[in-house]
Image: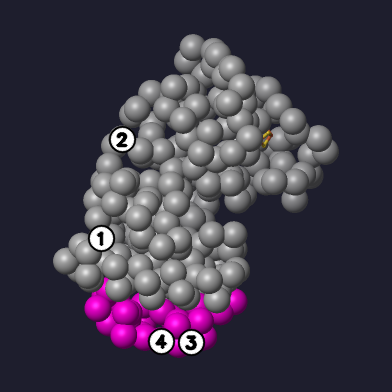
Amino acid sequence: MKVQPVVPRGRVPAVMRRLSRAIDGLDEPAVEKIANDQQEDPFQVLIATLLSAQTRDAVTAAASERLFKKARTPRSMAKLTVNEIQRLIYPVSFYRHKAVHVKRTCEQILTRFGGQVPATMEALLTLPGVGRKTANLVLILAHRSQQNICVDTHVHRISNRLGWAATRTPDQTEHALYRATHRKWWPVVNLYLVTWGQNVCRPVYPLCDSCVIRDLCPRIGVGKVGKSK
Ligand code: SF4
């Protein structure tokens, strides 16, 4: 990893405070919504996060709802066939692979973890299809960890635009953010930046002209910007 940028003192809290106000009223990310609706049920957070990879939020939410209507626990979901799971979660991206991962994850939760979703990074990473992004989100949303940052594509992109990280991968960004931000922000980095990334700091044509943190953002790597409606 390259030498990481030094973030000006006070910059991170100023950005986070403004974003906490600005995201009020915007749609929250699908997995956050599912976590809230299901009282932070670790199993449903885990499965919804597995389904969400490279999939639009509306599709993730609808697929999760269909699947949870059929089976809400590792035991009942493990009884579904891979084909049934595929049919229920289609059209999420990579639904064939994800159906296999869902089934195997349920089986392993039953056989290796006594039916409970594990609460450590090490154990979560042994489950099929679970990477750091999924594990961090489960730890934050379902196990109320204050020690983790969940970095997906939005958090990775915006952190680099803001100059909080100079990284090539989300995993590198996660480690850069542990150094660049105070731990009080770690549990909400994902919620704030994903919501901003879905609505304003979009992958292409970000809406910089109407962005509430424009004066705090060096806009590193940003080309053409979009126009607000
Ligand atoms: S100013 Fe532009 S690049 Fe910076 S956070 Fe806002 S939308 Fe993103």
Residue identified by numbered label 2: 147
Q: Is residue 27 visible?
A: yes
Callout 4: SS? loop
The answer for how far apart the CA atoms under marks 2 and 3 are is 37 Å
- The answer to whether 91 appears left or right of 33 in the picture is right
For mark 1, does the 10 Å Cα neighbourhood hold few (<14), some (14 to 19), or many (20 or more) residues? many
Point out the tag, 4 or 1, that comes first from the N-terminus: 4
Q: At 29% from the left edge and 68% from the top edge, which residue is drawn?
A: 108
Give residue 91's position: percent from left, percent from top: 59, 76
Question: In the rendered image, which quarter is residue 45 located in?
Answer: bottom left
Question: On the rendering, which quadrant does ligand 1 occupy?
Answer: top right
Q: Residue at x 59, y 63 (%)?
A: 56
Instruction: Decide: is 219 above or below 152.
Output: above
- Which residues lie in the magenta part? 66-91
Residue 163 in picture, x, y percent from top left:
61, 24
For residue 117, which numbered disc appears in the image? 1
Verify CB contact (< 8 Å) between mark 2 and mark 4: no
Question: Image height check: is 141 above or below 147?
Answer: below
Mark 2 to mark 4 CA distance (whole Å): 36 Å
Determine which residue is flagged by label 4. 81
Verify whether residue 30 appears in magenta: no
Q: Main secondary structure of the magenta part?
A: helix
Which of the marked residues, 2 or 4, is nearer the chain's N terminus?
A: 4
Is 46 situated left or right of 173 in this image?
Answer: left
Nearer to us of marks 2 and 4 is: 4
Q: Which label is found at residue 83? A: 3
